[in-house]
Structures are given as C-alpha cells and as structure tokens.
Amino acid sequence: MRTRALFGALAAAAAIAASQLAAALLNLRESPVLALAQTVIKLTPGSTAESVISVVGKNDKPLAVISVLAGMVLLGAVLGRWWLQRRPLALAGAVVATGLVVAAVLSRPYGSTGGVVASLLGGATLVAVLHLLVREEPEAEASAGVSRRTVLRMAGAVAVGTALAGTGGEVLAARHRRRRALEKVRAALKLPTRRVAAPAGTDLRLQGQPPWLTPNRDFYRIDTALTPPLIEPEDWSLRIHGMVERELTITYQDLLDRGLKDAWITLCCVSNQVGGDLISTTLFSGVPMKTLLDEVGVKPGADALLSTSDDGWTCGTPLSALTDGRDALLAVAMNGEALPVEHGFPVRQVVPGLYGYVSATKWVREWEVTRFADFEAYWTQRGWGAKGPVKTQSRIDLPLRDVAAGTVPIAGVAWAQHTGIAKVEVRVDDGEWEQADLAAVPNDDTWVQWKLEWDALPGDHVIEVRATDKSGYTQTAERSDVLPDGATGHDRVAVSVS
C-alpha cells in the first residue's frame, strides 16, 4: 500500500510537471498551478488570511504555492492507494481534480484555451502514470510478465522525466523571457523625474534606525499576486466609466503628456500590527487622480471609485479622498525611477491617508465611478472595513535590545497620513509621559522620526510610546486586532540595562 501511495504521489508530480511544461510551451501568462493557487487565495476568508500573514509574514505567497503543490501530491498518493481496489472512485477523483483546475484557470483574468489544454494534459498524465506504475502484487505481476524490477525501472524513468519536464519548463518559460525583456524596457524609459534624496532634517541618522526614505528594494510589498503582471507601457491603458458624463480610455503616453507631479507619501498596510514594519515612505511621481475625474465629469450620487488590477483584484476608494486636494496619484515612478514590477509597473494608485487595501491598486487597468452601496471589493468581501482611513500610530525602533547604562536614545517613527503628527510622548516603566523631539517632515502625508534622550539606569525596563495627531486625537492604549480596519494600541518594548 505504501508503494502504491508513493507511485501515486509520483504520478501527481509528473502531472504537475507536464502541465507546467505545457504552459511554458504555450506561452501562457499563468500556469494551471498558479491559477489554482490564486483561486485558493481568493476563496480564503479574510480572518484566515490575516492569521496566516501574521505567522508567516512575507512568505505567504511561497507558502500558498507550496500548499497547493503538497495538496496535489497528497491527492495523488490517495489515488494511488485506491487505484487497484477502487479504480472507479480513483478515476472519478482524477476527473474531479482536473475539472477543478480547469475551473480555476477559466476563472482567472488570464484564462484561455491554452490553460485548459495544459490542465487536461496534467490530468491525462496523472491517469497514465497511475496505470503504468500501480500494479498488482508480485505474483500477479509475474504472471502478467511485469516484474517488480521492471515497475521500479518505470518509476525511475517517470521520476527522471518529471525532473526534466520541470527543468525544461523553467528554461522554456515565456514568463522569464518576458520579465527580462520588460526590465530592459523599464530601464530604458526616460521619465521626467529627478534624483531623489530625503528632504533636509527628516532623517535623524541614528545607528540601527531604518532610514526616513525607504529604498525601493526595501519597500514593503503586500498583494494577492503570486507572480506580478508583466505589462509593457505601450500595452497599458486605463478605462474610466460608470457614473461619469463621458467615458475615457487613456494610455501610458497620455499620462506622461499630462505632466508628472512629485509627492512624498508614506504607505501603510492595514495588516500592520502595532510596532510592525508594513509601512514605507518614498517620493511618488504621477498624475493627480482628480484631474482625470474632473475630465470625465462625475455624476451626482457617486461616492466611490472601484478600481481593478490587471490580475482582477478590486479596490473601493472614497471619491472624497480623491477630490479634496490631497496628492492622490496615478503613479508611474517611485524614488526617481520607473515603478518596480512588484510595485505596480507601469501604473499604480497611491492615496495618502488610506490603507493600501482601499486605495493603492497596482497594475491598475479599470476605473468605475460608482457607489459603495452597489459593490463589494476584494477585501471588503472578506470582512474588512469599506473605507479604511489610516489610524494614528507610533513605533519604537531604538532600543530593541540590551543596552549599557548611561544616556541612551529612544527613537522611532509616528504617522497620521494626511492629518500630521503634533507630538510624540514616551514613558518608561509607567512613569510620566515625556515629549520627544520631532524631526522635520515635507508634509502631513509622511511619517516623522522622533527621539528622546533617556538616562538609562541598570535593570529591566519597559518603554512605551504614543502619538497625538494635528486633529488633537491621542492614540488609545487599548489593543485591537488589525481586522476589520487596522490595529490600535501603544507600542511597548522591554529593555535590559546593564
């Protein structure tokens, strides 16, 4: 029975390799495995997704793919055990599994006949290898003229073929070629941007504290795309429709011709826990979204913009946040260079003061001017709040470990995008709150670094921070989870002084 399960798992691996190789040869934008993994992500409840992210962090995407692959191999093992005594059930299982993969492929924005063909080839390979390897016990095998040694040789041949197919898929995969070609196009773009450095006085330059300006390579990334869409600028367009006076479709060159505006903006993820690092600051360059909305003419009664990504992800944004004068942009560049592919190249949205799940659509392709009452976007379908204003927060970056007695800097960042930070206060061991010094900021749409000199005495201590924004609101100490609209509570760290 164990041998049959092993051969079944091998059959599933061969099926995966065959479908991946077919996807590469057919130049598919998304393989059946990725389509199935994306579907699993889409069907995962918001609370479950948040629990997974809180445990595995930025490894959630690899984990999703590995989980799907492991599930497919496990299914193959079960079918291998059933193949002799319960063959009709095993065949039905193979057919149902193949049908689910086909359905996942067709449900995706990139679904195609080629994807169906690759899926069916995988299913056929699964059945063929099961028939080839899973046989009767040795006595029956011998009477049929098939020895155990022969079966093991066939299994070895399948294993080698599977490995070669997988390697061939990697080598031949059109996606890798497209990615390399797209990076060349991206590097060659001549955008009207400038060399970027942090504004004077914004960075306290304390050893161990993250810089005020986040390099592109370190900018946090949270999205649902297992592989980012690869879109050439000349192939990109944005359709604007819905509750508008006149529909409009614009191209990448249309955006550039309108002229770019630079804006310092801090983006924050709603999944950022108290003291977390899912937050970054950069200089975005793009076209104000308000100018496009003014151009199409928003009809009375509309209160939302439903934006859709190239990969089908949807996002609902309050129209009021796009038309009140803040630097809400259709961005084409960050930190003085074209957007990295993982961050939305060629065009993405950024809206100061809103969490990314209700504003920061990457690879944006479509706008529908509408009403919140008429739709639910991707994350609001999963229990998250509809409008997602950023909550006033602060974080301790220093010290985070044991320190020597003496004068020690306590430092960190605070943010209340589009409201601004008025003051930051720190206390040690539940003592009196002391006001920290604030660094400079270019506007109210970014975080601010802060610092307080502490006379650290030997012993164990707990440091706590809170911020007050320019509206007069002071952070609550009450802890709440990130679901449904962002975490609350004071960041606290324990430090030992020797």
Image: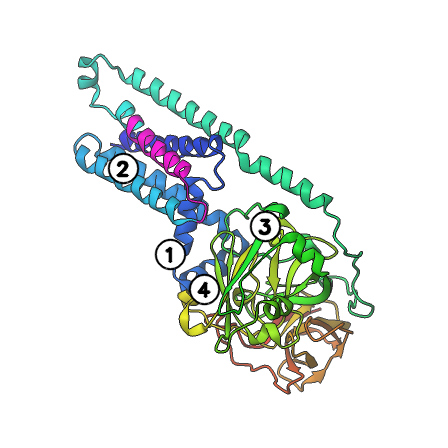
Q: CA distance from mark 2 to mark 4?
A: 33 Å
Residue 59 location (% of width, % of height): 52, 51
Label located before the other in sequence (4 or 1): 1
| Disc 1 target residue | 43
Q: Say which label, 2 or 4, has the lower sequence index.
A: 2
* Residue 114 is one of the magenta-drawn residues: yes
Q: Is residue 355 magenta?
A: no
Q: In the rendered structure, which disc, 3 or 4, sits on the residue that comes first in sequence?
A: 3
Mark 1 falls on what kind of element?
A: helix
**What residue type is disc 4 on?**
Trp
| Residue behind mark 4 | 379
Q: Secondary structure at mark 3?
A: loop
Distance from disc 1 to disc 3, alpha carbons, whole Å, reads 28 Å
* Picture quadrant of residue 489: bottom right
Image mark for residue 236: 3
Q: Nearer the viewer, residue 233 or 64?
A: 233
In the image, taking residue 272 as reference, residue 103 lies left or right, namely: left
| Residue type, mark 2 in image | Ala
Reading the chain from its start, which is encountered first: label 1 or label 3? Answer: 1
Query: Gap between marks 4 and 1, in whole Å?
Result: 11 Å
Q: Which residues are magenta?
A: 109-128
Residue at (39, 34) in percent of width and height: 118
Which residue in the structure is indicated by mark 2? 94
Element assignment for label 2? helix
Give the answer, above or below, for where 109 lies relative to 206.
above
Label pair 1/3, CB-CB below 8 angstroms: no
Q: Amino acid at mark 3?
A: Trp
Horizontal relation, residue 386 to residue 189: left or right: left
Label 4, residues with CA under 10 Å away: few <14, some 14-19, many ≥20: many
Q: Tell me where residue 136 appears, x and y as whole percent.
A: 20, 23
Mark 2 or mark 1: whose residue is earlier in sequence: 1
Q: Where on the picture, by quarter, is residue 126?
A: top left
